[in-house]
Image: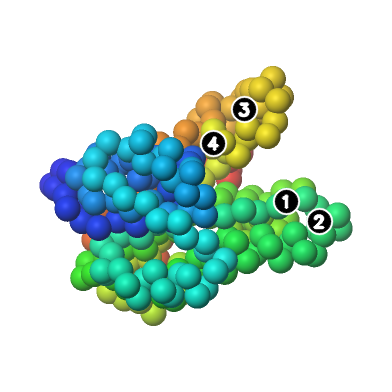
Amino acid sequence: MTTLQHFAQQRVLVVGGSSGIGLAVAQSFAAAGARVTIASRSADKLAQAAGQIEGEVTSVALDATDNAAIEAFFAHAEPWDHIVISAAQTPTGPVGKLALEDAYRAMDSKFWGAYRIARAARFAPGASLTFVSGFLSVRPSKNSVLQGAINAAIESLARGLALELSPVRVNTVSPGVIVTPLWDKLPEADREQVFAKTADHLPAKRVGQPQDIANAVLYLAGTPFATGSTVLVDGGGAIA
């Protein structure tokens, strides 16, 4: 069975679908014939992203930290065949230096945002839910301790939900260093230096692209025997 046959006319929601990994996931589902809805907080970014997706796509402004809005959205939407959650805003830094307000905000965005959506979502028969975590869950950094903890919590949440929501399948994709707009805050020369140094360190000898993660998401969504899994797509970062 081809990927197109897997997803033709299926309803797919990508939360965080306006840029980076989420946009690549939305593009891949749309190319496979799915009816895609992208969601994020910014209506302007959504409009721009929709123009980059070939296929059937709609958009909705949705804040993952707003539980009332999330519950209202799912209450009025038809059940989904696949939901992917890649949206998060997570301030980073060493525990001793990261302000508690920023730490709370990071947890609220990435972990509680995913929790709220999983709690409110309505699924069609044979549906899947896929989270995006990060390889810091298994290879922590002294400068990003909270991010590693949040990613580990996301992966644990997915395993538990795979039991609670069964037969809905729940999985996680754990990326390594991926070239996304999150890196745009660095000057171009510094950014390229980081990517080159990272690629030299990794067994794969390259940094990741959003499409690498999208491939893994579609694999999990389209594999009926995959649930409770965490798939590392990190160029070997967890073992390097």
**Residue 66 visible to the viewer:** yes
Percent across and percent down for residue 114 are: 50, 65
Question: Dots 4 and 1: beta carbons under 8 Å?
Answer: no
Q: Secondary structure at mark 4?
A: loop
Residue position for label 1:
92
- Check disc 1 and give the amino acid type: Thr
Residue position for label 3:
195
- Check disc 2 and give the amino acid type: Leu
Q: Residues within 10 Å of mark 2 (few under 14, many from 20)?
A: some
Q: Give the alpha-carbon distance from disc 3 to disc 4, as whole Å.
A: 11 Å
- Check disc 3 and give the amino acid type: Phe
**Res 240 quadrant in image:** top right
- Check disc 4 and give the amino acid type: Thr
Q: Who comes first in sequence, dot 2 or dot 4? A: 2
Q: Residues within 10 Å of mark 4 (few under 14, many from 20)?
A: few
Residue position for label 2:
98
**Residue 201 visible to the viewer:** no
Q: Residues within 10 Å of mark 1 (few under 14, many from 20)?
A: some
Residue sitting nearer the eye, 135 or 187: 187
Q: Secondary structure at mark 1?
A: loop
Residue position for label 4:
180
Question: Dots 1 and 2: beta carbons under 8 Å?
Answer: yes
Q: Who comes first in sequence, dot 2 or dot 3? A: 2
In the displayed structure, would residue 187 be above or below residue 225?
above
**Which residue is at a point 80% across and 53% down the rendered structure image?**
94
Q: Secondary structure at mark 2?
A: loop
Percent across and percent down for residue 148 are: 65, 56
Q: Who comes first in sequence, dot 4 or dot 1? A: 1
Would residue 211 appear left or right of 226 to someone viewing this image?
right
